[in-house]
Amino acid sequence: MREFTCERDGARFAYRRFGEPSKPAVVLVHSIGLDGSMWQEQAEALAKDYQVVVPDLRGHGQSPVSSKQFSVEDLGQDVLAIMRHEQIPCACYVGCSLGANIGMYLGAFAPERLTSLVLANGPPTLAIPEGIVELLCAGAVNGRMAEIAFDMLSRWIAPPFRQTAEFQHLVSKMAGCPGEGVAMALRALAKADRTGDLAGIGVPTLVVAGSEDGTFDAHAAADLACQIPGARAVAILGAGHLPNLEKPAEFAQMVFKFLNNHQSAWPNSMQARTTWS
């Protein structure tokens, strides 16, 4: 694993690269309040056969807080800037929550840069009233990230996982995320409505849900998949909003099989042979 930085439009953002640059590329994009480290297990597994690029979105992880409010479209363009920086012509994109919303944008407006798309636990629009969003943003920038992190993750995560040391680590991770970065990301997500973009997504798409996710369950995933041409939906039993962390083996099996089934989309010079355990 190596760490790099990239710049676009006056903003600087960090990313990690796993695997060899000569191999087909996979981009993994995290949820709000966390960072690329949430993909560590999947990145290490994929790196055997893929080049894996894992960004920290603006104001998250090692990426500084943006000097101005950004949009989900800006974050999508940041991902494309990283791909250009790495000279990656096309990649499979895997996004969770906020990362999924970014993926919907890229699937509709930059399909030539994607070979396939995995959207995990991300509705096309945020079903939270604007007033609640602004209360959360105010709390985030006024030193209440620890409280927000515990409340948010307690709602996101399925009950069994809340009893683990990994859950406490996630709370600490989110509590340490800059409040300004979280507030900007929340405002960006609140203004994003990808509903009208779904029919234009032009790459093979898998929609993943955690069965215990109160905001995006199996029914929501099936509904989203119906709006994307050729997409299919799968649900991971017993997982909440972060299935790659709560049920990593099941998530890997579903997502890795999907990638393997769509290797024909890679340019011939970038083919890789992959086996999944």
Image (cartoon, grey):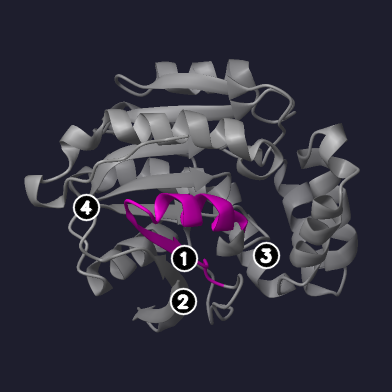
Q: For mark 3, does the 10 Å Cα neighbourhood hold few (<14), some (14 to 19), or many (20 or more) residues?
A: many
In this rendering, is residue 50 above or below 127?
Answer: below
User: Which residue is the site of mark 1?
Assistant: 55
Report x, y in % for residue 157: 78, 39
Q: From this viewpoint, is residue 173 visible?
A: yes
Q: Secondary structure at mark 4?
A: loop
Q: Callout 1, which amino acid?
A: Pro
**The N terminus: image quadrant:** bottom left
Secondary element type, mark 2: strand
The quarter of the picture where residue 16 lies is bottom left
How far apart marks 1 and 3 lie (CA) works out to 16 Å
Label 1 crowd (10 A; few <14 / some 14-19 / many >=20)? many
- Residue 110 marker: none
Report the Cα–Cα distance between label 4 and label 1: 16 Å
Callout 1 secondary element:
strand
Q: Specify whether residue 146 is painted magenta.
A: no
Name the N-terminal-most of marks 4 and 2. Answer: 2
Residue 257 point in image, percent of width and height: 40, 29
Tell me if I can see residue 123 in this picture.
Answer: no
Disc ID at residue 13: 2
Proximity of marks 2 and 1: CB atoms separated by less than 8 Å: yes
Q: Of the two numbered discs 2 and 1 on the same chain, state the one appearing first in sequence.
A: 2
Query: What amino acid type is highlighted by mark number 2?
Result: Phe
The CA span between labels 4 and 3 is 29 Å
Task: In the rendered view, tell whether residue 43 sits above or below residue 245.
Answer: below
Q: Residue at x 61, y 42 (%)?
A: 244
Residue 275 placement (x, y as % from top left): 36, 36
CA–CA distance in space, label 2 to label 3: 15 Å
**Label 4 to label 2, Cα distance in Å?**
20 Å
Residue under numbered circle 4? 90
**Residue on which disc 3 sits:** 182
> Callout 4: few (<14), some (14-19), or many (20+) C-alpha neighbours within 10 Å?
many
